[in-house]
Image (cartoon, helix red, strand yellow):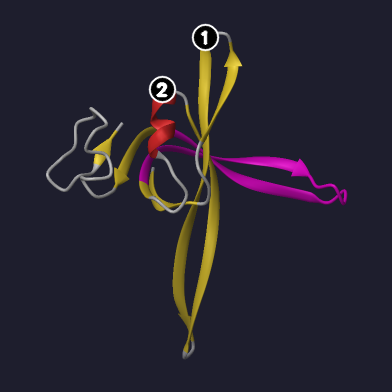
Amino acid sequence: MEIVGRLTADAEVREVSEHTKVVGFTIAVNHSYMSGEQRREIARFFECSYWRNAGITEFLKKGDVVQVFGHVGCRAYVTKEAEAAAALTFRVSEIKLFSSGAKHANSGEPANETGDLTF
């Protein structure tokens, strides 16, 4: 599956074990539709985890647009108010960053002709 959205905050790295790190970030995906004469918008949020390269964290900043490929899931939990809730999760296998070439010019990462980066 693939989704395109905007990061809601800077990505963070968590150390799972001595040799394993995971990059966590949340993506907002906006959907709009018409209800009669009125345009409506809904944002859906995906809690993403990326296990391949913790170095990407420096490129995942709040407000950036990314395209991610992977598998969607759901995490059930109970809120502080003792109410049942759920969150959409996304196990990311590949990330494409949409940016200007200048932003990542000194990164040492391969950029295509539009300045986009793929990890």
Choose between 110 and 45: the one closer to the eye.
Answer: 110
Residue 55 x %, y %: 40, 25
What residue appears at the point 45 percent right and 71 percent down from the top-left corner? Answer: 32
**Disc on the earlier residue, 2 or 1:** 1
Residue in the image at 80% along x and 47% along y: 79
| Quadrant for the N terminus in the image | top left
Q: Could you tell me which secondary element the residue under label 2 belongs to?
A: loop
Q: Quadrant of residue 75?
A: top right
Depth order, front residue of 103/82? 103
The residue that label 2 is drawn on is: 52
In the rendered image, the residue lying farthest to the top is: 18
Main secondary structure found in the magenta portion = strand
Residue 16, image quadrant: top right
Q: Is residue 79 left or right of residue 96?
A: right
- Residue located 31% across and 31% down the image: 119
Q: Is residue 37 above or below residue 48?
A: below
The residue carrying pointer 1 sits among few (fewer than 14), some (14 to 19) or many (20 or more) residues within 10 Å by Cα, namely few
Q: Residue 105: x percent and y percent?
A: 21, 38
Is residue 83 rendered magenta in the image? Answer: yes
* Image vertical order of residue 41 relative to residue 115, above or below: below
- Measuring from the top left, give residue 2's x and y in whole percent: 37, 45
Tell me the residue that label 1 is attached to: 19
